[in-house]
Image: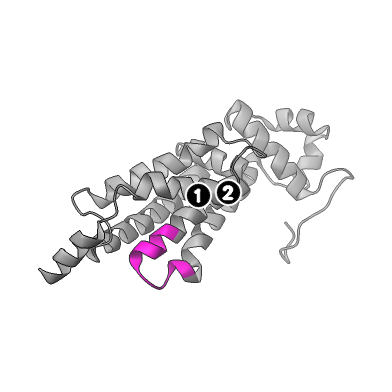
Amino acid sequence: MSENGTLRRGRPGYDQQGILEVAVAAFNQYGYDATSMGVLADRLGLSKSAIYHHFASKDEILERALDDALSALEGVLQEPEATRGRAADRLDHVLRGGVHVLIAKLPYVTLLLRVRGNTEVERRALARRRAFDRAVTALVEESQAEGTLRSDIDASVVSRLVFGMINSIVEWYRTGGREDADRLADDVIAVALDGLRMPTSNRVEELLG
C-alpha cells in the first residue's frame, strides 16, 4: 500500500487484492507456515519480486487478510441495530451479522479461525477476536439481566456455544447452496436462541416478583 493509503499496482494480471485472495486460498489449503513466498509465486505465476512489490512480507499478507475478517466482524458491533434497543434484539442482530460476515468473507474468516498465535500478527488478531467475543458475552449478560434469556446458563458458555455453531459453518457451507445468508441466519437464531429465550409468562412473573 502506498503512503497515501491507495492500493499499489504492479505487473499486469494481479493487483494487491488479487494477490491477497490467491494467498488466502493457499494459506487455507496448505497452512500458513507451510506456504512459502515461493509457493505463492508459483500459484500466481509471478516472480517473488513481483509479490514483494505489493507486500513487504508474508506476515503482511496474513495481517491484511485477518484484518479484513476482523474489521467486518467489529463493524457489526458498531451498526445502529447493535448499539440501541433491547439487549436481546441487539444480540440477535450481532449473531445474524456474524453469519453474514462469515458467508461474505468465507475464506478470510476460515483463515482467522485457524490461527493459533504462533506469530505476533496472529497474537494481535487473537486479541481482537477475544475482544469481539467479550462484547457478545456482554450482550448475553444484558439479555439475561433484562429477563429475555434464561439466566441459569453462564453467559460465556452461551457465547462460546453459539459462535461455535456459527464458526462451524466454514467447514460445510458452499456458496450457491440451498440456503442464502438470510435463511441461514434465521436457522442459526432458531437453533441457538429459541431454547434460551424465556417464555413470556415467566418473564412477567420475574418482573412482578
Whether 22 is drawn above or below 151: the answer is above
**Is residue 186 covered in magenta?**
no
Q: Is residue 84 left or right of residue 173?
A: left
Q: How many marks?
A: 2
Task: Measuring from the top left, give residue 93's x and y in whole percent.
Answer: 46, 60
Q: According to the image, label 1 marks what residue?
A: 185
Q: Amino acid at mark 1?
A: Ala
Q: Amino acid at mark 2?
A: Ala
Q: Secondary structure at mark 1?
A: helix
Which residue is at 50% across, 43% downward? Answer: 122
**Is residue 87 covered in magenta?**
yes
Dominant SS in magenta: helix
Task: Measuring from the top left, give residue 146's x and y in whole percent.
Answer: 25, 66
Please state the extent of the stretch shown in magenta in the rendering: 81-92
> Which disc number belongs to residue 124?
none
**Camera-side residue of 145 and 21:** 145
- Quarter of the image containing the N terminus? bottom right
Residue that protrudes farthest toward the right in the picture: 12
- Look at the image and tell me whether residue 155 can be seen: yes
Whether 125 is drawn above or below 27: the answer is below
- Quarter of the image containing the C terminus? bottom left
| Contact flag, marks 2 and 1 (Cβ < 8 Å) | yes
Whether 195 is drawn above or below 168: the answer is below
Q: According to the image, label 2 marks what residue?
A: 181
Q: Is residue 79 left or right of residue 108?
A: left
Q: CA distance from mark 2 to mark 1?
A: 6 Å
Which residue is at 28% across, 63% downward? Answer: 142
Which residue is at 60% across, 46% downward? Answer: 180
> Callout 2: few (<14), some (14-19), or many (20+) C-alpha neighbours within 10 Å?
some
- Look at the image and tell me whether residue 101 can be seen: no
Which residue is at 87% across, 43% downward? Answer: 13
Task: Measuring from the top left, give residue 87's x and y in whole percent.
Answer: 34, 65
